[in-house]
Amino acid sequence: MIVCVCNRLKESSVRNAARAGATSADEVYTHCGVERNCGRCQDEIELILDEEQVPAGMEKAA
Ligand code: FES
């Protein structure tokens, strides 16, 4: 799924950036080698970052 239309960033790219240590949308853009354009993706990126920052053992039950 494309999260950032301007930069064609996929959800998997955002998750990879989070796992590499990105903690903000700006850090995700930097990690992916792109720059913020319209910014409409920022909320979605931050939601994904929140999901990736759940401590080990605290994941939601399926
Ligand atoms: S959708 Fe990400 S900067 Fe526009």
Image: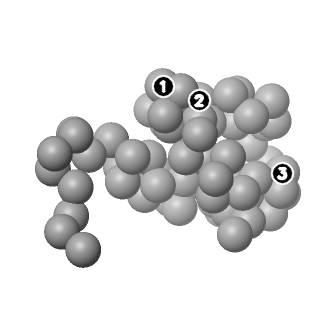
Give the labeled residue for mark 2. 27
Bin the neighbour count of mark 3 within 10 Å (Cα to Cα): few under 14, some 14-19, many 20 and up.
Answer: some
Determine whether, in the image, residue 42 is placed left or right of residue 29: left
Task: Determine if the C-beta at disc 3 is less than 8 A from ligand 1.
Answer: yes
- Residue kind at label 3, given as amino acid type: Asn
Cα–Cα gap, marks 3 and 2: 14 Å
Between 2 and 25, the one lying in front of the other is 2
- Residue kind at label 2, given as amino acid type: Glu
* Earlier sequence position, callout 3 versus callout 1: 3
Between 34 and 52, the one lying in front of the other is 52
Which quarter of the figure has residue 47?
Answer: bottom left
Depicted 54 relative to depicted 29: above or below: below
Whole-percent x, y for residue 52 in the image: 39, 46
Q: Residue 21 carries which label?
A: 1
Q: Which residue is drawn at 64% across and 53% down?
A: 12
- Residue kind at label 1, given as amino acid type: Gly
Give the labeled residue for mark 3. 7
Cα–Cα gap, marks 3 and 1: 20 Å
Counting labels gives 3
